[in-house]
Image: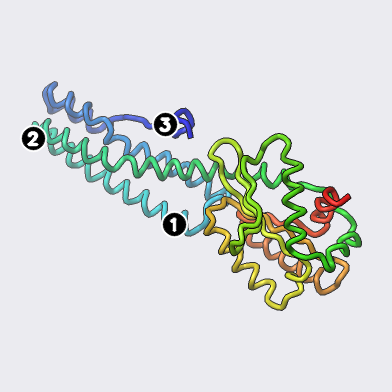
Amino acid sequence: MSDSNKPKVYRIVLTEVLGLAEAVAPSTIQSAIRATGSFGQYNQYYEEASRILEKASTAGTISPNDVSSIRATLDKWRGLSEEYKIKIVELTKENEPEKLVDIKKEIDEQVPGQQEMIQAMHEKMLGTKIWSNVTGFFAAKISDKEKTAFFEDTPHAKIVDWLFKWIETKNNENFFGEIIHGTRESGVDIIVQVSSGSKQKFGIQVKNNEDVKAKDFSQKLKAQITDSKKHKVQGLILFFAANMTDGSVEKKISNILSEISQIDDTFIKPISPERAITIISEVIS
């Protein structure tokens, strides 16, 4: 990411400390305090990160566990900010400009970690927009469920191959910079990487009719969703290529789609068989 796209770093000085300096310290101490300007980044980062976290939490782009972890870290930063503020006030009273400079060095060592976390949160917020574009790429008209009978005996590998070719054909505007076929990794059949910005990666998992009919379909699918996250993908498309004219298959697909909808997991984007057949038909027609 270019420097122009990185979150701005603000160098500010706590007003209450400067006010105290004006009242009790000579100009040399005031200059030393201003020289430590980066200590004010603690509060700046805290406020900025808190705003980003709140937006990401509301948008559902950060998991509850991540939200809890980040909030704990933010609270730690706020505590350090208060500690340094107290130290600076005391050193101001004691006329110790050299020690103020040492405090600046301590704080400067902490700042990169804060910046990295804010950058990560910006990435997640940006990822929401990219994910919307990725899922939009797979938008397709809904076909009649009778057409999904085509998937009755279609092998998983064949569907993956067709889908890979469809992506290559539709990718005429180079939205994807890289398309990886046949990863042979648990949880992902195809990985696509966007060609611009932070070049985030997204996974595609294909489920054919045989997969859906298996007794452990639901349990295995959930395990694969978890495994897919090991690939550092920002989202997972579930491509259901199954025969919806089969009552048992239709029930399983309907149940899993309902469950995904209820948990409101933005990491997952399901493609129903009625849409999947529209996509595959564009390749084999």
Q: Which of the two marks, 3 or 1, is nearer to us in this view?
A: 3
| Residue located 81% across and 68% down the image | 250
Residue 282: % across, % down: 84, 48
Say which amino acid is labelled 3. Lys
* Residue drawn at (76%, 66%) of the image: 253
Q: Nearer the viewer, residue 263 or 154?
A: 154
Please state which amino acid type lies under the numbered disc 2: Glu
Q: Secondary structure at mark 1?
A: helix
Q: Nearer the viewer, residue 197 or 176?
A: 176
Question: Residue at coordinates 32% horizontally, 29% vertically from top-left?
Answer: 11
Residue named by callout 1: 68
- Assign a secondary structure to mark 2: loop
Q: Which residue is mark 3?
A: 8
The location of residue 214, given as percent across then percent down, is: 73, 75
Q: Secondary structure at mark 3?
A: loop
Find out whether the residues at labels 2 and 3 contact each other: C-beta distance under 8 Å. no
Observer-side mark, 1 or 2, equals: 1
Q: CA distance from mark 3 to mark 1?
A: 25 Å
Question: Could one spot residue 266 in this view of the protein?
Answer: no
Q: Is residue 251 left or right of residue 64?
A: right
Work out how far the residue at label 1 is from the one at label 2, CA to CA, in angstroms: 39 Å
Q: Which residue is mark 2?
A: 94
The earlier-in-sequence mark between 2 and 3 is 3
Going from the N terminus, do you reach mark 3 or mark 1 first? 3
